[in-house]
Image: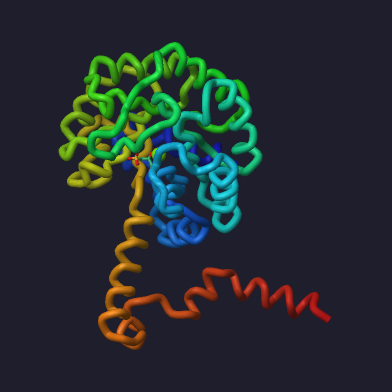
């Protein structure tokens, strides 16, 4: 059901000059629940960057596949928005991916994103990162394998701009991945202005919607992006704003406690204990206690 809802949202918004679907990043179930509670998001982006950061390791295929799967599944257990799982390069070749997608589908995931870099990957946003792409045919095999083995949406991501290969290569790869069966194409850029992405979107002649992650070019509003790309963007991903908000909030509070030599000064700026009880689903547990504890 979550996959159908996301599919509908993606295809209805793309090509219609309306607001694209918006996904908010999360790195754990609590962040996913807070994103759902915010009310304005259509999906949760189970971000590899966020999960890596939450474990204080680089976003470079270092997190174990088991931890990745378990974290993704638990995000879906505490809130109802569809989960878009960031499978990076697919944990290996097309065969590794073919086995992995079944596990993500069983975990309740609605959509996956796979990217055309070599394994192990490096973060797209890292200055001077090691960005090598696999041959087009090899990645088409990954897209086809994922499509054949599950009914989740398969979003194929090209890192052609990230690898410095230019728009022609990006368009060629996007079209090749659509041909292999991708439901949408994610086009990523780390330029500090949206020019590269806007130009790609305008030149896009494929039929499937586009997906963008405007982390490095945050100037445009969601509706600006929809308008300036002729409605070809069906999904916008806020790539890492949960972990960045968490880090900024903790740093501020920790610094103040150390400087103040006490905890009174942060009372106003941290969540109350009762808010945390509520996020833990405390009232549901009390209800179970009332009914069943004898
Ligand atoms: C992520 O959030 O893990 C992404 C987006 O893949 S980016 O970090 O910009 O590559
Ligand atoms: Mg990622």
Q: Is residue 258 above or below residue 231?
A: below
Residue 263 rendering spot, x and y as whole percentages: 36, 85
Left or right? Give the position of 191 relative to 249: left
Residue 109 rendering spot, x and y as whole percentages: 57, 41
Left or right? Give the position of 192 relative to 254: left
Residue 168 rendering spot, x and y as whole percentages: 24, 15
Q: How many marks?
A: 0
Residue 242 rendering spot, x and y as whole percentages: 38, 56
Q: Nearer the viewer, residue 20 or 245?
A: 245
The residue that appears at 41% across and 24% down in the rendered structure is: 118
Q: Nearer the viewer, residue 28 or 288?
A: 28
Q: Is residue 42 visible?
A: no
In the rendered image, which quarter is residue 272 located in? bottom left
Left or right? Give the position of 154 relative to 69: left
Q: Nearer the viewer, residue 26 or 48?
A: 48
Q: Quadrant of ligand 2?
A: top left
Residue lying at the far right of the rendered structure: 294
Residue lying at the far top of the rendered structure: 137
- Image quadrant holding the N terminus, namely top right
- Image quadrant holding the C terminus, namely bottom right
User: In this figure, which colouring scheme has been used for the structure?
Assistant: rainbow
The residue that appears at 16% across and 38% down in the rendered structure is: 193
Q: Is residue 110 above or below residue 291?
A: above
The residue that appears at 37% across and 45% down in the rendered structure is: 22
């Amino acid at each position: 059901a979550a996959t159908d809802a996301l599919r509908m949202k993606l295809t209805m918004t793309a090509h219609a000059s309306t607001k694209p679907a918006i996904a908010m990043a999360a790195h754990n179930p609590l962040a996913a629940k807070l994103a759902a509670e915010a009310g304005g998001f259509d999906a949760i982006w189970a971000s590899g960057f966020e999960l890596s950061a939450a474990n204080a390791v680089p976003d470079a295929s270092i997190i174990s596949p088991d931890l990745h799967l378990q974290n993704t599944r638990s995000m879906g257990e505490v809130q109802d928005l569809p989960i878009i799982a960031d499978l990076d390069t697919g944990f290996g070749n097309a065969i590794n991916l073919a086995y992995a997608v079944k596990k993500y589908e069983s975990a309740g995931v609605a959509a996956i994103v796979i990217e055309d870099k070599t394994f192990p990957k490096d973060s797209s946003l890292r200055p001077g990162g090691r960005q090598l792409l696999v041959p087009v045919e090899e990645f088409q095999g990954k897209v086809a394998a994922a499509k054949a083995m599950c009914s989740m949406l398969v979003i194929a991501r090209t890192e052609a701009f990230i690898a410095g290969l230019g728009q022609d290569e990006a368009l060629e790869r996007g079209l090749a991945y659509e041909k292999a069966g991708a439901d949408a194409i994610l086009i990523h850029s780390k330029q500090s202005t949206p020019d590269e992405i806007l130009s790609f979107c305008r030149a896009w002649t494929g039929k499937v919607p586009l997906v963008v992650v405007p982390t490095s070019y945050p100037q445009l509003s969601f509706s600006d992006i929809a308008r300036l790309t002729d409605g070809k963007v069906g999904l916008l991903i806020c790539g890492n704003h949960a972990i960045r908000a968490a880090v900024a909030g903790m740093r501020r509070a920790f610094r103040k406690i150390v400087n103040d030599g006490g905890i009174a000064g942060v009372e106003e700026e941290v969540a109350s204990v009762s808010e945390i009880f509520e996020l833990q689903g405390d009232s549901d547990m009390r209800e179970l206690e009332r009914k069943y504890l004898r």
